[in-house]
Amino acid sequence: MKIKIISGITAMFLLASVDAAAQGTLAEATKGNFLFGVAVNMPQVNGVNPSESELIAKEFSTIVAENCMKPQPVHPQENTYNWEDADKFVAFGEKNKQVVTGHCLIWHSQVGRWMFVDENGKDVSPEVLKERMRQHIYTVVGRYKGRVKGWDVVNEAFEDNGTYRKSKFYQILGKDFIKYAFQFAHEADPNVELYYNDYNVETASKCDAIVQLVKELKAAGCRIDAVGSQSHMHLTRPTLKATETSLKKLKAAGVHILITEWDISVLPSPYHGANVSTSFTYSKEMDPYREGVPASVQQKWNKRVLDVFELFLKYDDVVDRVTVWGLNDAGTWLNGFPIRGRKDYPVLFDRKNERKAVVNDMIKMANKYNSKK
Ligand code: 9MR
């Protein structure tokens, strides 16, 4: 009898470990569906916490730089380029045999003011801005030619209501700044994929504006491979229906789709979007999970992750990549946005770098989905 019990427990233990081993990683489970990636910061590239760098190498098939390839860090002054971090980042991806994405060439945020003004601080002419854009894009895309699979060429050019954001690029060049950016990127590396990237793509007015942009770019003979839907989400917003509608619309527009910055905030929020200049005052009520997420809320988050992930799988004929915006809850940008100093839990690894339970369910879901194909 005793032997029977022990062998029963042993069998259970064995089964559990076989189950865990059979699970593998999300990148492996979704290999036939899309690339599965993560946004990486410089401490991770530099191996400050080696276990984080190892996790990134092991669990993901593609990486994107959270900050180091943006215009300001790479090109802080007209004649100054800082390559150190971006070079290290690209080499890190290559060492790990990961697909590397470039983020981002033209964005209203994290860009040096020098780009838009002359020596007297006055706005430059359209010709000068266009030439500065060309220089920037040729130099950055040219440097990583053949090493980066694709670039977020233009980031966040629209407001949620579908009008053009009145950025300096737009003010000086009108909407054609987008077309120029795509043309220059293609000239700099004819083989590199080119993406338009934005948040709240699930908002109908914004999605329609992006679809219109895709049509206009194509009509102008520009290469555009995919639209990046950042997918910064909350527990209930955007709805699954709105998310699916946006995927359908983009698919119908004849572009591929990348889920570029996926996270699901567990916290209450006065704002739904990723406009980095938005901020609200801290209050304890808006930061309710300092000691951990209650089981009931965790369940909601898990279900939400699985529901959204199921949609990504359903559209895997056009979704080429799913990238999570940050490795772990400790490092997520959402701890500081849109309210500083909160404790959020929006990504797939916790503050101890443990894989969250939902990841195994995602892997099972992908395996089941693929076994039916
Ligand atoms: O996650 C990034 C954060 O570390 C930076 O401080 C911030 C600065 O603008 O940019 C964050 O990344 C943004 C991305 O580049 C574009 N979409 C919204 C992301 C979250 O703000």
Image (cartoon, rainbow, N blue to C red):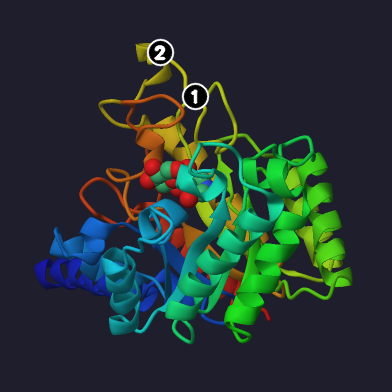
* Residue 358 in view, yes or no: yes
| Quarter of the figure that contains the N terminus | bottom left
Q: Residues within 10 Å of mark 2 (few under 14, many from 20)?
A: few
Residue drawn at 59 percent across, 67 percent down: 134
Looking at the rendered structure, the kind of residue marked 1 is Pro
The front one of 115 and 6 is 115
The front one of 60 and 80 is 80
Residue at which label 2 appears: 285
Residue drawn at 28 percent across, 64 percent down: 85
The front one of 189 and 306 is 189
User: At which x and y percent is residue 306?
Assistant: 55, 53
Looking at the rendered structure, the kind of residue marked 2 is Glu
Is label 1 in contact with label 2 (beta carbons under 8 Å)? yes
Residue at which label 1 appears: 268
SS class, disc 1: loop
How far apart, in angstroms, are the residues tagged by discs 1 and 2?
Answer: 9 Å
